[in-house]
């Protein structure tokens, strides 16, 4: 197993390089640029041509595309993720300030997804074509079909503007200095809606996969043998069906975490949460290439990492799977 993990880690290096090249080229080819506002004749008019040339030289925007990439990649290898065109701050520091909020949001959403999706999917499969199954299936299809931004806006309309139960934006009330348990309650009230939006969308998708995997397992011969040996239905489900059904579901779970991380872009923007998703939107509006590259590189790394974790979990769930 250790040899397999090392080999996969080494294979990830050229993959990340290829991803970085593609993303870098695509960002550089987008219309406009970090100096688009200053170059606009209808702008403030305070930036002279000489100042523009100085800024372009400072950011290396006059260099050939391949030279810009090599400079960026060389700095990255040395631990320098670049400097924001907009704020002048180091990219790594900006991401470090925003990542705790995103980790808190996505971590709670993933936990809620697990708590909801597995029981609903298992019961729905065990009671196929029952009233519970029809309700769960309908709710799952609605959750898949409804866009997350629309769901977030509906939450705001109902629970904030109509009922006034929950705060609309942020992770805390800036007008109050809460301490202790009061601070925890305030943070929880601000997290309920964004976490619910992320969790409901991912739960709808994961529930369908859990149900389908369980239905495939329940018809196997070893399940009939387990029942014939006198195991109760619950024991057969938990000891035999769930473990075998978890193998295909692990793949979905491995991709669900990066999806939640990336999906926080919409939720953080709507609920004004200062996380990486909102930083990505702000940087995209300003064509802040170094910050965008840093965020996209982290997202790519997460996809590769959790695919590797999924492969490792396969061998733990199924003894027949061995990696060399």
Image (cartoon, helix red, strand yellow):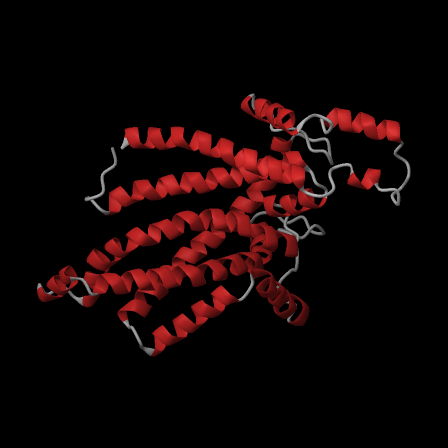
Task: Examine the rendered structure and indicate whether residue 174 appears above or below residue 304.
Answer: below
Question: Picture coordinates of residue 309 (x, y %)?
Answer: 36, 41
Question: Picture coordinates of residue 130 (x, y %)?
Answer: 31, 77
Of all residues, the one furthest to the left in this rendering is 229
Q: Is residue 166 left or right of residue 116?
A: right
Question: Picture coordinates of residue 29 (x, y %)?
Answer: 66, 39
- Which corner quadrant holds the C terminus? top left
Q: Nearer the viewer, residue 163 or 210?
A: 210
Q: Quadrant of residue 121?
A: bottom left
Task: Examine the rendered structure and indicate whether residue 75 appears above or below residue 227.
Answer: above
Q: Is residue 76 left or right of residue 111?
A: right
The residue that appears at 66% across and 60% down in the rendered structure is 168
- Which corner quadrant holds the N terminus? top left
Question: Picture coordinates of residue 153 (x, y %)?
Answer: 63, 64
The residue that appears at 45% across and 29% down in the rendered structure is 13
The residue that appears at 55% across and 59% down in the rendered structure is 192
Q: Quadrant of residue 310?
A: top left
Q: Count all numbered tags in the image, as a single digit.
A: 0
Task: Examine the rendered structure and indicate whether residue 84 appears above or below residue 148.
Answer: above
The residue that appears at 42% across and 38% down in the rendered structure is 305
Residue 271 visible, this angle = no
Residue 263 visible, this angle = yes
Q: Quadrant of residue 82?
A: top right
Q: Nearer the viewer, residue 153 or 184?
A: 153
């Amino acid at each position: 197993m250790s040899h397999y993990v090392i080999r996969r880690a080494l294979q990830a290096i050229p993959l990340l390089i290829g991803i970085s090249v593609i993303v870098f080229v695509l960002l550089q080819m987008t219309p406009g640029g970090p100096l688009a506002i200053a170059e606009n004749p209808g702008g403030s008019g305070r930036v002279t041509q000489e100042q523009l040339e100085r800024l372009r030289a400072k950011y290396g925007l006059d260099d050939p595309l391949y030279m810009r990439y090599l400079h960026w990649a060389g700095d990255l290898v040395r631990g320098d993720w670049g400097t924001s065109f907009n704020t002048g701050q180091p990219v790594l520091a900006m991401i470090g300030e925003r990542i705790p909020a995103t980790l808190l949001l996505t971590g709670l959403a993933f936990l809620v997804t697990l708590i909801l999706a597995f029981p609903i999917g298992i019961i729905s499969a065990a009671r196929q074509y029952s009233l519970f199954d029809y309700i769960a299936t309908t709710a799952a299809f609605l959750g898949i079909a409804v866009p997350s931004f629309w769901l977030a806006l509906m939450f705001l309309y109902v629970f904030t503007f109509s009922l006034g139960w929950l705060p609309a934006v942020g992770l805390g009330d800036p007008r109050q200095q809460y301490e202790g348990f009061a601070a925890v309650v305030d943070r929880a009230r601000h997290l309920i809606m964004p976490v619910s939006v992320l969790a409901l969308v991912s739960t709808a998708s994961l529930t369908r996969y859990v149900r389908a995997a369980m239905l495939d397992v329940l018809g196997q011969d070893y399940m009939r043998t387990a029942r014939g040996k006198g195991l109760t239905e619950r024991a057969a489900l938990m000891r035999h069906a769930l473990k075998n059904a978890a193998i295909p579901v692990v793949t979905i779970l491995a991709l669900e975490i990066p999806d939640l991380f990336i999906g926080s872009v919409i939720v953080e923007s709507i609920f004004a949460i200062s996380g990486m998703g909102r930083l990505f939107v702000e940087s995209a509006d300003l064509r802040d290439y170094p910050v965008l590259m840093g965020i996209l590189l982290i997202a790519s790394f997460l996809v590769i990492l959790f695919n590797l974790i999924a492969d490792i979990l396969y061998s733990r769930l199924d003894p027949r799977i061995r990696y060399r």
